[in-house]
Amino acid sequence: MSEAVKNRLPQIIVSLLENDMYKFSMGQAIYHQFSDYKTTWDFRCRNTDVKFTPEMVDEIKAQIKLYCELRFTEDELEYLNGIRWIKGSYVDFLRLWQPRYEDFEISADAECGLAIETKGTWLNTSMYEIPTLAIVNEVYFRMQYDYDRLFASFREKLEEKANRLHTGKYYPAAFSEFGLRRRLSAEAQELAVRTFAETRICAGKFVGTSNVYLARKYGLMPVGTMAHEWIMCVGQGNHRHNPAYSNWYALDAWVKEYGVLNGTALTDAITTDCFLRDFRLTYATLFSGVRHDSGDPYEWGEKMIAHYEKLGIDPKTKTLLFSDSLDFERADKLFRRFGERVNVAFGIGTYLSNDTCVPPLNIVMKTTVCNGMDVAKISDTEGKGMCRNPDYVAYLQRCIDWRMENDR
């Protein structure tokens, strides 16, 4: 190993499968339809009291260099090829694909002490988001705290969670582990996945994980379809598009790629109300369900059930996937509210992968530029968006407002 990649900690990302499933779902559609798109991504730490030291920044650089040395193995490619909606042409592309460290710009030039920008083809930069966040998290918690103490508190809390499921205290219905991006460590996430895979759950069912590497290792379902970047880039990365119709462009491209397969639509990229203008009978029929990621989950659930009923679709044939800041108690309450009227599922992240005696990081990487143009999301919760250009956010909001008033 060269001097440039010497690291203090064990290698954090050990496989290119160690990514969320929706990155592969989107990646295939990007490869087939948008391979010429270019994007820029920005890192942000939302914790106002967190400071990354120069030693942490150096370690993050070293870990990302190690990540960029990885390649898919033939066994890993064979596993991906066995997923029903993954096509051989995309697997062949991944056989040649590798991360590029040249696409990263990492420095201490930020208020929190860590600035990260990735820039390049959407095919590349999309794949960097989750491993980068996982690296940042693990470096921070291992170098800022007594890691053994943190892991002991994590294990204790995890055992308590498993016991509550085993005894039937909570009923979270079908739930998946979604914690890769904000996990305490690779060790912690694997322990969580293994624990729930082996726990006899009295009420509910553990169905899978977004971490494709762990899904393969433990014979679980890899879970994930689309993220906000899909709607933002497909809908706003073309200057000929009115961004208020971003959902239509994104849904259309998704159906072109997958038909009736792999169909959980994300509703809140430019507000759920605007999404519903495009989620009409054809798309509502083709997509198996929708995902909640911001705003009041009860209001959202009622809105989606009413929308299906208005279209003449039996809500019991569709799934509402909740994934916003969940724990078992919130999931239990949501299931009791909706479980008899619609299929309910949960994607639970930080609560399963980074619940310790110290607060977790609230870090994100977001697409901010696509094809040289600003892109943004306006979710159902104020403050969850991220854009370099406030004027563009105002323009996007005006487009949405005009559509909601005039396009009925």
Image (spheres, grey):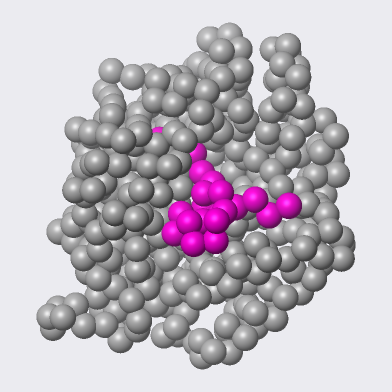
Check the picture and name the quadrant holding the N terminus: bottom left
Horizontal placement of 387 versus 7: left or right?
Answer: right
Within the magenta stretch, is there residue 222?
A: yes
Residue 354 in percent (x, y) is at 58, 70
**Residue 122, image x, y percentages:** 27, 41
Q: Nearer the viewer, residue 302 or 225?
A: 225
Q: Is residue 233 visible in this depiction of the protein? A: no
Residue displayed at 51% across by 33% down: 262
Image vertical order of residue 28 relative to residue 158, above or below: above
| Region in magenta | 205-230
Q: Is residue 255 magenta?
A: no
Name the image quarter holding residue 272. top right
For residue 196, what is the image quadrant? bottom right
Looking at the image, which is closer to me, 21 or 34?
Answer: 21
Image location of residue 220, percent across then percent down: 57, 54
- Residue at 83%, 54% in the rendered image: 203
Q: Is residue 145 above or below residue 320?
A: below
Residue 222 shows up from this direction: yes
What percent of the width, then of the height, locates residue 95? 23, 48
Instruction: Give the residue displayed 21% in from the left and 65% down from the top.
Output: 69
Which quadrant: the C terminus? top right
- 115 or 324, which is in the foreground? 324
Q: Residue 224, relative to residue 42: is it above or below? A: above
Q: Say which of 129 and 217 sits in front.
A: 217
Total numbered circles: 0
Q: Residue at x 47, y 35 (%)?
A: 84
> Is 59 on the left-hand or right-hand side of 294?
left
Q: Where on the picture, by quarter, is residue 102? A: bottom left
